[in-house]
Image (spheres, rainbow, N blue to C red):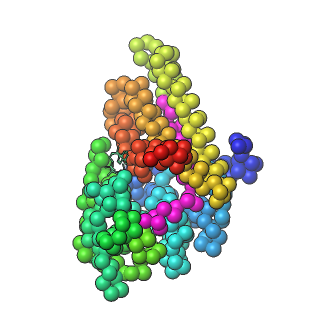
Amino acid sequence: MDFRLTPGQEALKKEFENFFREEMKKAPLLGAENIYDNDEAWDFHCYMARKLGERGWLSRPWPKEYGGQAAPIIEQLLFNEVRAYYRAPGVDYQGLGMLAPTLLASGNEKQKQQHLPPIARGEIMWCQGWSEPNAGSDLASLKTKAVRDGDYYIINGQKAWTSGAHRAQWCFMLARTDPEQPRHRGLSFFLVDMNSPGLKLRPVRALNGTHMFNEMFFDDVRVPKENMVGDENRGWYVSLMTMNFERSSIGFMAEAKRNLEELIGFCKETKRNGERLSEQPLVRHLLAQLTIDVEVGLALSYKVAWLQGKGEAFVIPAAIAGCAGKVYGSELGQRLAYAGSRILGLYGQVKAGSKWSPLKGRFESSYQECVSLNMGGGTSEIMRTVIALRGLELPR
Ligand SMILES: Cc1cc2nc3c(=O)[nH]c(=O)nc-3n(C[C@H](O)[C@H](O)[C@H](O)COP(=O)(O)OP(=O)(O)OC[C@H]3O[C@@H](n4cnc5c(N)ncnc54)[C@H](O)[C@@H]3O)c2cc1C
């Protein structure tokens, strides 16, 4: 593996950096990262999404016929790295990261033409209706039903933990269309307009009080049959078709790098008991270890993108390395949040907005949020099981 960027890649990274450095000067002072909870932050997210869309940066890796530039995965990694480092919103993870690759792989022409351009322009936001109260890791046990009625499917059931559903215009979801089939074979993949009659949301507040999650209730929601992606009862396999999407977890690593840099700066400036924090052996040890951890994480993310860029033959090794990146990146975020809170001491518990809260309350918030990092998108236990079974070929 060659660790150097080409001159073209260096120039592209600079272009991303210049853009995000300037644009982030306009970010709301508080909550720019918590886009779902706060109207001002959401408006800024939408503004950034349209700006990124105008530049064609959201859809760079897509094929040219759908408005992309067929850009290599490594360039998408650079974009995601710089964006995460600057804590910039503007990317709809569900629409761009999950649905678009699914439509590109399994959507029909009409679905691609209807949904891909608005995603590329940053106009339409999506949510992901997969998990249910009794179906998370074991997703195939989901119970929400879709029953065919003429040109429609009638959907009934409940979804859980739907991030950003209260902001989204559309939802992609899985529902059971044939209860007689083995679990994975009776599911279908639907696109649902969030304004559909019978669809109701109930907010679920996170540990730190923010509103990101929702419960979604489907009560006789009518969905046109054209909104099914792929064939009936093949939804499970449709949902797996996201392989051409950059999945290096670089966002975790770049965000950790930025947070760590700020923590180090704080330790250099702040005295406690007459001594700078940066002079205290325990603090120095923690910071040095985290610096090593961040560098390891960045190298791992670059490795995933490199493997993905090598094509079809490397799909499995890239997916396994992607699982390792997810486990490592989420646990790195947790180690950093815990270490930062420990170093900041009691002031570190003061919420953003107070003159007493160091580093804009970032560690107060991340200490609470980081609990969920290794659950969303597949838990660490499930990822480790995949690595053991598929990567190491250990017995079941
Ligand atoms: C931040 C965040 C955002 C999310 N956003 C969305 C969203 O937008 N849309 C959506 O549909 N869902 C979303 N989810 C839900 C997420 O997909 C589930 O939380 C996840 O799949 C785990 O399911 P669960 O919570 O039901 O836990 P469970 O599956 O009940 O797991 C509980 C514990 O048991 C362990 N466990 C379960 N099965 C096994 C096994 N076979 N072997 C070993 N250990 C096991 C798990 O690792 C976990 O520690 C989100 C979750 C989070 C935390």
The residue positioned 48% from the left and 27% from the top of the image is 266
Residue 174, above or below 356:
below
In front here: 92 or 371?
A: 371
The image shows residue 188 at horizontal and vertical percentages of 39, 71
**Closer to us: 226 or 43:** 226
Magenta stretch, main secondary structure class: helix
Residue farthest top in this picture: 274
The magenta stretch is 236-263
- Relative to 271, say whether 217 is above or below: below
Task: Pick the quarter of the image with the N terminus.
Answer: top right
How far across and how far down the image is residue 236, in percent? Answer: 43, 65
Name the residue: 55% across, 59% down.
243
Is 156 colored magenta in this rendering? no
Figure quadrant of residue 293: top right
Q: Nearer the viewer, residue 348 or 21?
A: 348
Residue 153 is drawn in which quadrant?
Answer: bottom left
Instruction: Identify the residue at image location x=58%, y=35%.
Output: 296
In the image as oriented, which residue stretches furthest toward the bottom? Answer: 150
